[in-house]
Amino acid sequence: MYRNLCAKKKIFTIFTLFCFTSYQVHLSYYKPNASSILENNRFPKGIFPRLSSRKYADGCYNVYLDVGSNIGVQVRKLFEPEKYSGALILPIFDIHFGKENRAQTTCAFGFEPNSMHTHYLQEVESYLHSKNSRCTFFTNTAAALFAGNSVMHHHSIDFDGLGGSLLIDKLESEQRTRAKLKKAYISTEEVKTIDLGQFIKEHIQSRKIPDMYDTMRSPPSVVMKMDVEGYEYELLPSLILSGALCGIDFIVIEWHDQHLENSKFASKYLEIRRAVEVIIKNEKRMKCKTVIKELDDESYAKDGVPMSKQV
């Protein structure tokens, strides 16, 4: 028993020190005079209200958070599952959102900092709106620890689809591991950031849920997919510390351990992951409903499924 207590104390200490360090590093990017990210993003008329009137997720029975949207294919899988046969995430959607009437019951919010995907995501959003699906992509915007601006890092050459990241350590580790990247350099772009914990607490947890209990076969559900190219080691701890994590029913995550194996902080990242998993298990005993599952659904990664708008 003494050993177990010591182990838990060690995990908590590592976790706390890392979270404190992460906040110190990222606050250096914060710009106090940055305009409100949420106010400046587009929402379709008649579907999503402005901050001054209501919560963004008001009227949404279920919510799907697509953190690291890339080209938005997971959101298309949510609303058009029949077009993405065999996708690994479909059973999770079925369990939490049901198999029918998702356009009427479920809202999707996607966050993607890579500006290369902005135009395509806007096309996907417009297409899904034409089918009366309730979704919004925050483009050129990262889900982060704070609201303001930060720096997105990219390899100067594309290599097997390796994604950019707010965590520069990931890219540096990949360059040490992969010979083709050793001659590459790391480019940067400034991106907007949303405080994900605050967004979840203010606009998801506090949303007005429609009275659909008689027609729905399950209680309201919030599912989050997180694929943020190594930044999960900072983002998940911040959600725990803010209390926002318990507002999520189910988290699907891709951990990027293998991309950070050559980092001088590799052992730290593994300890953070273990700490997060232990804390979530302990939180469940304290009536925190969150379940976390490692799953990387790369099916239809380049999409390729035609978008034909309703006339």
Image (tube, rainbow, N blue to C red):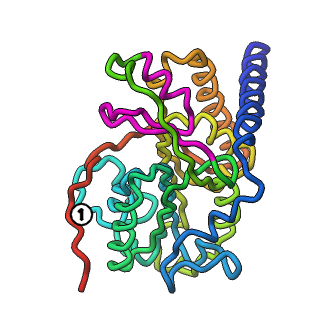
Q: Residue at x 68, y 54 (%)?
A: 148
User: Is residue 239 positioned above or below 175 on the image?
Assistant: below
Q: Position of residue 207 (x, y in %)?
A: 65, 72
Q: Does residue 46 appear in this view?
A: yes
Q: Residue at x 71, y 79 (%)?
A: 52
Q: Depth check: 201 or 91 in front? A: 201
The quadrant of the image that shows the C terminus is bottom left
* Three-letter residue code for mark 1: Glu
Element under disc 1: helix
Q: How crowded is mark 1: few (under 14 residues within 10 Å), some or many (20 or more)?
A: few
Which quadrant of the structure image shows residue 271?
top right
Residue matched to label 1 = 82
Which span is picked out in magenta? 150-176
User: Is residue 201 positioned above or below 54 on the image?
Assistant: above
Q: Position of residue 186 (x, y in %)?
A: 47, 31
Q: Depth check: 38 or 55 in front? A: 38
